[in-house]
């Protein structure tokens, strides 16, 4: 039995920790860094000049937005010196034009680097996968009423910062925006640089985990990602989300240090995936009829640090009934069963049973699982590797340098391939 004084000690520890956390947050509100100057960059004050806002129309509203022609690049933010970007807000045709959300690219450069630290389709960057829209608010992003984009990720820089958009769509972009930042004498020498990486595989390979974040080298912190799934039409009516998220930290090779238990488990839910959102995890798009999903998970409260390298992947795995598995095998669908869950075994709700021959469970073996075996009841549900899904993701992380070793943003042709069928199903 736990003694009363131990309980009191534990409660006191919780109270002190909570009080300390609140005090730290409050102190951040009522104190300021030495010499900090608040600035906003917008079309009404493109340089953030002190006393320079609203010049165009003698103080009245006169230049609220920019127009960016097809093929044109526009610098939205270009400042010198040390500082921290604290908030980015954008709206305009980029929030209502589906093509622009995927075809307009957003790039951010720190400290004069020639390679962008952030490079992503504008819509995907702001927290909703597949370039779709949904009203939500998380710890890092928000889209009130699905009419705008907000980002509140702190982005420190020591010498300079630049933000560009490039219009790779076929229509003119009208963009309203502001970038709120602090001018500082200096930032903490240990401050890391914010990065974002976007990738897409329109046709996944059976058994290959999708790389949310390919191996990035350096010291840093993984912040999380938003992920978009466009399922192989052959799998419609099955469940897509058995895949586990894996994080390979600091020279992990064959096996990861961090591994979850399933897709909806990783994003804080369970037993399927409806529409919801919260500070750290959510599912903003759940279209089971068409097998289209967009969801996110942010590690702002459970830190993921690395000191040499980091790679993050998600398995391409789903589940279906035995009857459906047999049907897919008969039609030569690109899939492979993994294991058995029998709903009748020993009267328990769900008991996991592996096939008696373990070699049949490996993708590099040719012997299939015998689904007609008497050991499998008619109510069994099987996990299976999925192939030919369309998966994309935006990964967010901090790194101890302004450039990374990751590949460049894929061309607009890959970003837009077969997306019209998804945009046409968007809820208006």
Image (cartoon, rainbow, N blue to C red):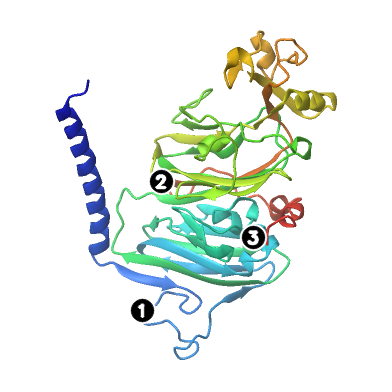
Residues packed near mark 1 inside 10 Å, few (<14), some (14 to 19) or many (20 plus): few
Mark 2 sits on what residue? 300
> Alpha-carbon distance for marks 3 and 1?
33 Å
Residue ID at (49%, 27%)? 256
Which of the pair 117/207 is nearer the observer? 207
Residue 200: quadrant of the picture: top right
Which of the pair 58/21 is nearer the observer? 21
Mark 1 sits on what residue? 50
As helix, strand or loop, the secondary structure at mark 2 comes to: loop
Mark 3 sits on what residue? 101
Quadrant showing the N terminus: top left
User: Reading the chain from its start, which is encountered first: label 1 or label 2?
Assistant: 1
Indicate which label's residue lies in the foreground, 1 or 2.
2
> Alpha-carbon distance for marks 2 and 3?
26 Å
Residue ID at (21%, 33%)? 10
> Alpha-carbon distance for marks 1 and 2?
33 Å
Residue 206: quadrant of the picture: top right
Q: Are marks 2 and 3 in contact (CB under 8 Å)?
A: no
Which of the pair 352/411 is nearer the observer? 352
Q: Is residue 100 above or below residue 319?
A: below
Residue ID at (54%, 53%)? 127
Q: Is residue 39 above or below residue 360?
A: below
């Amino acid at each position: 039995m736990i003694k009363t004084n131990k309980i009191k000690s534990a409660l006191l520890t919780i109270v002190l920790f909570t009080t300390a956390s609140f005090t730290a947050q409050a102190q951040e509100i009522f104190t300021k860094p030495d010499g900090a100057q608040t600035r906003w960059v917008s079309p009404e004050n493109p340089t953030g000049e002190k006393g320079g806002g609203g010049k165009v129309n003698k103080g009245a509203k006169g230049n609220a937005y920019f127009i960016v022609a097809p093929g044109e690049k526009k610098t939205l933010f270009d400042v010198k010196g040390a500082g921290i970007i604290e908030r980015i807000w954008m709206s305009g045709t980029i929030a209502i034009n589906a093509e622009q959300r995927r075809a307009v690219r957003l790039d951010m450069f720190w400290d004069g680097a020639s390679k962008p630290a952030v490079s992503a389709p504008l819509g995907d960057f702001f927290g909703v996968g597949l370039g779709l829209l949904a009203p939500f608010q998380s710890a890092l992003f928000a889209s009130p009423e699905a009419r705008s984009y907000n980002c509140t990720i702190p982005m420190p820089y020591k010498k300079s910062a630049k933000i560009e958009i490039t219009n790779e769509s076929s229509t003119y972009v009208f963009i309203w925006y502001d970038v709120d930042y602090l001018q500082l004498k200096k930032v903490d020498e240990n401050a890391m640089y914010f990065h974002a990486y976007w990738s897409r595989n329109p046709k996944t390979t059976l058994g290959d985990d999708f790389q949310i974040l390919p191996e990035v080298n350096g010291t840093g912190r993984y912040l999380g990602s938003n992920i978009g799934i466009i399922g192989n039409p052959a799998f419609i009516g099955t469940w897509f989300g058995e895949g586990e998220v894996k994080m390979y930290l600091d020279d992990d090779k064959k096996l990861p240090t961090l591994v979850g238990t399933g897709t909806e488990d990783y994003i804080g839910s369970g037993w399927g995936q409806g529409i919801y959102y919260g500070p750290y995890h959510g599912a903003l798009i759940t279209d089971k009829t068409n097998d289209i999903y967009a969801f996110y998970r942010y590690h702002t409260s459970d830190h993921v640090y690395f000191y040499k390298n980091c790679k993050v992947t998600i398995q391409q795995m789903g589940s279906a009934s035995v009857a459906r598995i047999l049907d897919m095998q008969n039609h030569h669908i690109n899939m492979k069963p993994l294991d058995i869950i029998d709903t009748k075994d020993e009267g328990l709700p769900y008991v996991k049973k592996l096939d008696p021959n373990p070699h049949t469970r490996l993708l590099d073996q040719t012997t299939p699982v015998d689904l007609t075996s008497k050991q499998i009841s008619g109510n069994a549900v099987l996990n299976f590797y999925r192939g030919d899904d369309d998966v994309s993701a935006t990964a967010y992380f901090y790194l101890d340098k302004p450039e990374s070793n990751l590949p460049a943003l894929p061309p607009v042709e890959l970003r837009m391939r077969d997306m019209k069928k998804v945009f046409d199903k968007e809820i208006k």
